Image (tube, rainbow, N blue to C red):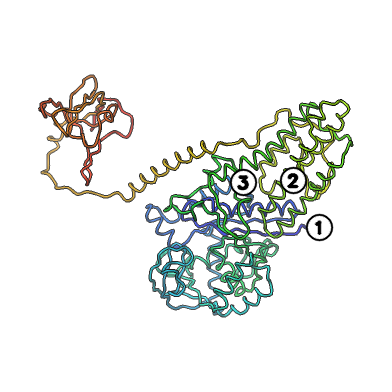
Amino acid sequence: MDKKKYYITTAIAYTSGKPHIGNTYEAVLADSIARFKRQQGYEVFFQTGTDEHGQKIELKAGEKGVTCKEFVDEVAGEIKNIWDMMNTSYDKFIRTTDEDHEKQVQKIFRKLYEKGDIYKGYYEGMYCTPCESFFTESQLVDGKCPDCGRPVTPAKEEAYFFKMSKYAPRLIEYINEHPEFIQPVSRKNEMMNNFLLPGLQDLCVSRTSFKWGIPVDFDPKHVIYVWLDALTNYITGIGYDCDGDSSAQFEKLWPADLHLIGKDIIRFHTIYWPIFLMALDLPLPKQVFGHPWLLQGDGKMSKSKGNVIYADQLVDFFGVDAVRYFVLHEMPFENDGVITWELMVERLNSELANTLGNLVNRTISMSNKYFGGEVKSTGVCEPVDEDLKAVVLGTRKKVEDKMEELRVADAITEIFTLFKRCNKYIDETMPWALAKEEDKKDRLAEVLYNLVEGICIGASLLESFMPETTERILAQLNAGRRSYEELETFGLYPSGNHVTDKPEILFARLDVKEIMEKVEAMREAEAEDNAQEETKEDAPVIDIEAKPEVTFDDFMKMQFQVGEIIACEEVKKSKKLLCSQVKIGSQVKQIVSGIKSNYKPEDMVGKKVMVLVNLKPAKLAGVVSEGMILCAEGEDGKLALMTPDKEVPAGAEIC
């Protein structure tokens, strides 16, 4: 019998820059659903990828001095690396610069044009470059973009438009007849009341003001608007062909079972995308789920706020599965979730280290201490065992019910309820007390067997959310992952099997103070790097009055060398001068410099500087100076020593 298919997609990530943990959350969420469906026996196809066209990309590439393709290649590679680092089990990573995708988008545009659904006109309105969206004045919020809150600019240009209103009544009817189509329900109400029922305007689907996009093949000065391009990835990625020669994979997988997206792009996926599909005579996806945002403690993440957290940073501190646990468990079903470094530490210590890690470690340690690692069922049962077994065996159904509703956080809570029940079982049965009585050894063995069995079932259920942790737990128990059907049977762990003799710590407890000190150091380093980058990109320039030209022979008379300052003190008779002893090769020269307002004597010692060595000696404030230390002067009059950017010995010639 063929397995039932399940096609799940994420929104494709926009390649304008490195995705933060809020963006990464979506890929991890989709992965947990895909893994759970595979565990249930579905044939899953999980597609993710990158959205790579648009004016914003063109501008950013120009700022970096690279081609648009070079820019998106780099960012797409970084996004893919982060998805891989987070252990996401996608089946396809599509890029909208893929040749087959671009070809199909052109064919789709032409087909809709020839059908009369697309026509040429002029667009005049307010345009938000980051969102790649046009808005009317009435749609703006406080004069800014209603989606991202950024400024908008007036724009007028020739464009092609899609007749949205033609299909609006049909879409309204579909949504009313399929209440499961848009989830959560609050998102459906928002789309109906704010967009569909007031009446849809025709949608701009091409641009002429930039070039980085898929050209309209019959009118090349136009590029296809990013949303028509990006949304169609869900069908082009599985082999859709506009000419009717679609692949067997497309015929099998479409319609998608779930589009998983952020709530900020719900309009595009529940209004524009369904209408495009209707125009192509294709069935609509079964469900679109608009998940909430994962916010920093002080609001939505943005570089301008300096509160962005990246997945690789979190992984460096906590490990992949701890990060997966947090973003999946801390995100509510409808409301925005919050992530902070302090909260990460608290959850790792309380749930992962205490509830789970300590349970596994105690169980393995007691099995080794009392039975040399052997885990054996003796059949010596007591009533308390039945309650443990009921909780363990009831967990699969509870997790399944939560996952059917896409309540992933609640599903994880059910699994940790199982682990907490196992911890309570230890307190109830007191293995350490049983071990003191010889006639209780069989009872002790049964208690430890029940614990190992409960952990095996819990760990197998945990695999969709924390796959590496499941693997580590089962390896220590010398057990395989249970099939989905086996998760409702207690007693499958082979009696007489042996656990590892050296249990490993799954999650080490962390000190929040130490973590925050490291985080602060990391932020300071980032701020310094960003400042240097901004300096490179936006550094002001100074024009000074030109001096008379000199000949090469004149220049060659001057001798410049690297000097190392070995001592420095203030010149007592001056408010401006410092006197430095400068080692140049085997010599030491005394040089007086007017830099006291910018450098303290102790700051000078040890620095390597550029020195004009053969300057005629002179007395300054009564002190002999035998050369000149070179500095640069900023517009504000501040001085900066000219120093080599690589390690060179004192005395090296500057040429």
Spatial CA distance of label 2 from label 3 is 25 Å
User: Mark 2 or mark 3: which is in front?
Assistant: 2
Q: Quadrant of residue 603?
A: top left
Tell which tag, 1 or 3, sits nearer the viewer.
3
What amino acid is labelled 1 in the image?
A: Met
Position of the N terminus by quadrant: bottom right
Marks 2/1 in contact by CB < 8 Å: the verdict is no
| Alpha-carbon span between mark 1 and mark 3 | 30 Å
Mark 2, secondary structure of its residue:
helix
Q: Residues within 10 Å of mark 1 (few under 14, many from 20)?
A: few
Give the residue number, with chain letter if any, for mark 2: 418
Which of the pair 314/362 is nearer the observer?
362
The label shown at residue 87 is 3
**Residue 76: image location, x then y, percent:** 51, 52
Q: What percent of the width, then of the height, locates residue 380?
A: 89, 36
Identify the image quadrant of the C terminus.
Answer: top left
Q: Is 620 positioned to the left or the right of 466 in the image?
A: left
x 50%, y 57%: residue: 14
Place residue 174 in its image quadrant. bottom right
Residue on which the image places disc 1: 1
Nearest-to-viewer mark from 2 and 1: 2
Judge from the rendering whether residue 367 lies leftward or rightward of residue 219; answer left or right.
right
450, 136: nearer the viewer:
450
Kind of element beneath mark 1:
loop
Would residue 391 be visible to someone looking at this image? yes
